[in-house]
Amino acid sequence: MIAVILLPLENNFPTVAGMSFGFFIFAAIAAYVILNRPGNLGTVLFHPLFIAAYAFIVVSALLEFSSPLSYYLDIFRFAQMIGGAVFLAVLCRDRSAFAAGLYGYIATGLWVSVVLYLTGYGTLQGSVAEDFDEASKLREQAFDKPMGANINALAGWCTQGAIVAFSLSLSDRLKHLHTPLLGVAIFCLVASLLPMSRGIAAMSLVSFAVIFYARGFRYGKALILACLLGTIVYMVVPNAVWSRMVYSTEVRDGRMEARASLYTTVLNRLPEYIVSGVGAGNFYNDWGVKKGFLRKGNVIGVHNSFLQIAINWGVLGLTMFLWIIWRVYRSLPLQCGRDELSLALLGILVSLGIYLLQIHNFYDKSFAIGLGMLVGARLWIWPRGIVSEVVRNKCEPGAGINTRSDCHSR
């Protein structure tokens, strides 16, 4: 829980020998696991999802070695991310430990939401934007990298807090917390829209749709709840936010919208990189400069992890990365809608999948938390791969047992 809560703050602390604050958080977890849970660590290391990740690391490193201007930093960061996921998976050995991680998402969503409200809500509420360009300028005025972090990343944490709070509010065992949790979900969801990120808005929409589908609401109940949430959010969010929720490839004043221009360049260059890639080092140097990825004097990533991997290491590297995504899908327990914890996990993973479509940093630490919780839950909470009704007998598999004495006596 502490790791989740503190992670958005990593940009507020100076690096030590090139290592970030987030690195030390995971290092502390790793030290605890190695000293206290070496047997569990051995089990986690050979989970099929992590085996797919190891294969991606090896293949991408070999492809990078064969390219000019080899650059291994992104691969090394991805390996660190997978290492963090491995150690986190060891901690999720029962329902109470897993729930602690989910409460961390709620706490993070709340405090980041407060920061966003205090930073930009007043400016947005008192301003008017007629089109995308005006809304973008207003966004820059309202948010000048609060806490030194990427504003879209902060909005993503708010979305995930809303997802977890909403999932827990649907629990039949937490009826006394339904209203507070629903209030938290709305509070975080509105905050996630304040930075005017189209990708985060899509993340929220898709994640909540999947939660509704997995829960299996009857049509009328789901429609009423969805309309209630949508109405409240629409009424509270400043009108200027909606002016930026458009996407166009139209050329205006001699230029195309930045994200559309970037994706257009990627597709136009597809035959040049799809077979074997150009290498990460080559992309960020000579190739990227010549092929139109230069912005303000620097080569920038393509804001899409799948496209970035395809450019770096071609169809083979992309295939290996898609294998990881497939293993994530296969690791999800069936019938997630039966249990609020599995429903929240499903929502988190869907949000991270949408996030991959928006950033080229496929090694982001937020992925370590999601993957670690998934593998831990699959190994110990739902080992048979099916979510059954929450078991009241604490000696049943996945019931969240912390000691073994009672089960032995039974």
Image: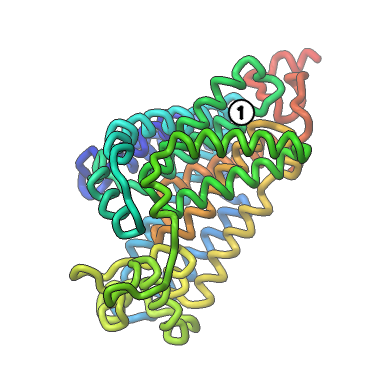
Nearer the observer, 359 or 42: 359
Where residue 363 appears, as percent x and y from the top left, is 42, 55
**In the shown orientation, is residue 30 left or right of residue 403?**
left
Image point 39% across, 54% down: which residue? 244
Where residue 336 appears, as percent x and y from the top left, is 71, 40
Which class describes the residues within 10 Å of circle 1: few (<14), some (14-19), or many (20+)?
many
Nearer the observer, 281 or 144: 144
Where residue 44 appears, as percent x and y from the top left, is 58, 44
**In the shown orientation, is residue 406 left or right of residue 90?**
right
Nearer the observer, 10 or 222: 222
SS type, badge 1? helix
Image point 20% across, 68% down: which residue? 296
**In the shown orientation, is residue 53 left or right of residue 23?**
right
Quarter in which the C terminus is drawn? top right
Residue where numbered disc 1 is placed: 168
Where, by quadrant of the figure, is residue 358 drawn?
Answer: bottom left
